[in-house]
Image (tube, grey):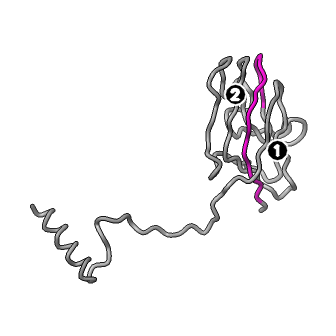
Amino acid sequence: MRRIAAISLSLVLFLSGVYTASLFSPRARAQSTYAPIQCNQSVAISSATSVQIVTAANANMRVVVCNVSLGSIGGSSFSIVEGTGSVCATNIKAMGGGTTAAAGWGIAANGSPVQFGSGLGPVMSTQVLGDNVCLIVAGTGPLAGTVAFEQQSY
């Protein structure tokens, strides 16, 4: 009964303009000082071997991945990594999965694709400015799909 009285009093005070907070609306949140990330580039992938999928535009760029959608007709496993050199093999770091295909996601032959992210907001990003992004692949069938990304300068 006390709770109903408190809600009624708050509603009366709110409607009269004395009390400006409402029990029926969400709390006000501070606005972010960062712009929302919307990936504006994508790359189509069809490869049975490891491949570099994004080349950093310069040494001051961070690559942000917002969407990954990959499938396989023959069964494969993969990881998404960052690094430099041939297929990101130098200073390799895991972005999604591990630093080897075996430590990453597995897709059964003709199985459901691996999908994450909507394209709005990051799901992973490079840790080191200037690093490239690569797909490390192992298995019997090629991977096919897309990766959406954005490059941000720092």
Above-or-below relation of 140 to 65: above
Q: Amino acid at mark 2?
A: Gly
Residue visible at 39% across and 66% down in the picture: 27
**Position of 9 relative to 130 (above/below):** below
Query: Mark 1 — residue?
Result: 54
What is the number of the mark on residue 112? none
Q: Residue at x 83, y 52 (%)?
A: 130
Q: Is residue 14 left or right of residue 108?
A: left
Inter-mark Cα distance, 1 to 2: 19 Å
Secondary structure mostly taken by the magenta-highlighted segment of the chain: strand
- Quadrant holding the C terminus: bottom right
Label 1 sits on a secondary structure element that is strand
The amino acid beneath tag 1 is Val
Q: Position of residue 21 (x, y in %)?
A: 32, 73
Q: Position of residue 129 (x, y in %)?
A: 79, 53
Q: Which tag, 1 or 2, sits closer to the chain's start?
A: 1
Coordinates of residue 136 in the picture (x, y in percent): 78, 30
Identity of the residue drawn at 9% across and 61% down: 1
- Residue neighbourhood size for the residue with mark 2, other residues' Cα within 10 Å, grouped as few (<14), some (14–19), many (≥20): many
Residue 116 located left or right of residue 27:
right
Of 3 and 16, the residue lying toward us: 16
Question: Which of 89/118 is in front?
Answer: 118
Query: In the image, residue 150 lies at what x, y percent?
Result: 74, 53
Magenta segment range? 136-152
Q: Does the magenta run of residues contain 138?
A: yes
Question: Which dot marks residue 71?
Answer: 2
Task: Identify whether 34 is placed above or below 131.
Answer: below
State which mark lies toward you, 1 or 2: 2
Residue positioned 86% across, 42% down in the render: 84
Crowdedness near tag 1: few (<14), some (14–19) or many (≥20) residues, C-alpha within 10 Å: many
